[in-house]
Amino acid sequence: MRTALDMNWFELCKELNINVVVLSYMDTSIDFLRTLSPSGIILSGGNDLSSINPLSENTIRDKYERSLVEFAMANEIPILGICRGMQFLGEFFGGKINKVSEHVRCKHTISVSENRFGIIGGERNSYHDYALSNSGLMRVVARSPDDSIEAIEHATLPIVGIMWHPEREIPFCKSDKDFIRNFFGV
């Protein structure tokens, strides 16, 4: 079994002056997280949800991310879900995921509705085979031209999901950096 985090996350966070601690879903306790008092949690991209592909690593990761979301909600800690992370948040709040086409290794324009944290529309990268078809309790704030859901936010809690990967744009996109700064209050 292999887990990985794109090294560009470290570069992006360094540019934003955000300290990063990487947690492994292979350690399913959140005791370490309690000692950190984090300012925010990022649920990164990579691999499928267990509802799509029930491999043990996906099931273990989903269980761990569920405990992270519950911990963050109980402690009013902002959560940003990226791609798989957004899919997880969507399912967590009752949404549904479907297979999509023409969303892998491409770019498309997203349209953005009013949102609380400054997500800006425009051209975004896309690296996913699945997307939310229903956002459950989350509010849809961005869509792609094929009407796929590209960003969601919770109505009252600091919880946001985006389907694009800010860490994969070099140089990093100013509007993504502004959004992340605003979201985490840095």
Image (tube, helix red, strand yellow):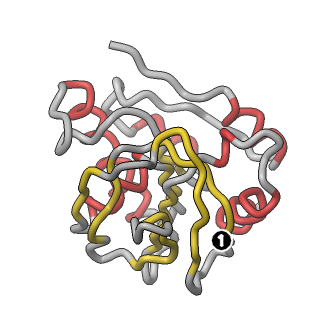
Q: Is residue 105 above or below residue 3?
A: below
Q: Disc 1 marks which amino acid?
A: Gly
Pick the quarter of the image with the N terminus.
top left
Residue under the image location 82 percent in, 58 percent down: 174
Q: For the view shown, which residue lies furthest in the bottom direction?
A: 114
Query: Count of labels shown?
Result: 1
Residue ID at (32%, 52%)? 100
Q: Position of residue 143 (x, y in %)?
A: 48, 71
Residue 7 x/y as whole percent: 66, 26
Q: Is residue 154 above or below residue 90?
A: below
Residue at 58% of width from left, 86% of height from top?
A: 114
Q: Residue furthest top?
A: 1
Q: Which quadrant of the figure contains the C terminus?
A: bottom right
Q: Nearer the viewer, residue 71 or 45?
A: 45
The foreground one among 52 and 180 is: 52
Residue 52 at x, y percent in the picture: 20, 42
Q: Looking at the image, which residue is at 35% across and 26% down?
A: 27
Position of residue 173 relative to residue 158, above or below, is above
Q: Picture quarter containing residue 110? A: bottom right
Mark 1 crowd level (few <14, some 14–19, many ≥20, 10 Å Cα)? some
> Residue 134: where, in percent of width, then height?
27, 71
Q: Which residue is mark 1?
A: 121
Disc 1 secondary structure class = loop
Task: Identify the image quadrant of residue 97.
Answer: bottom left
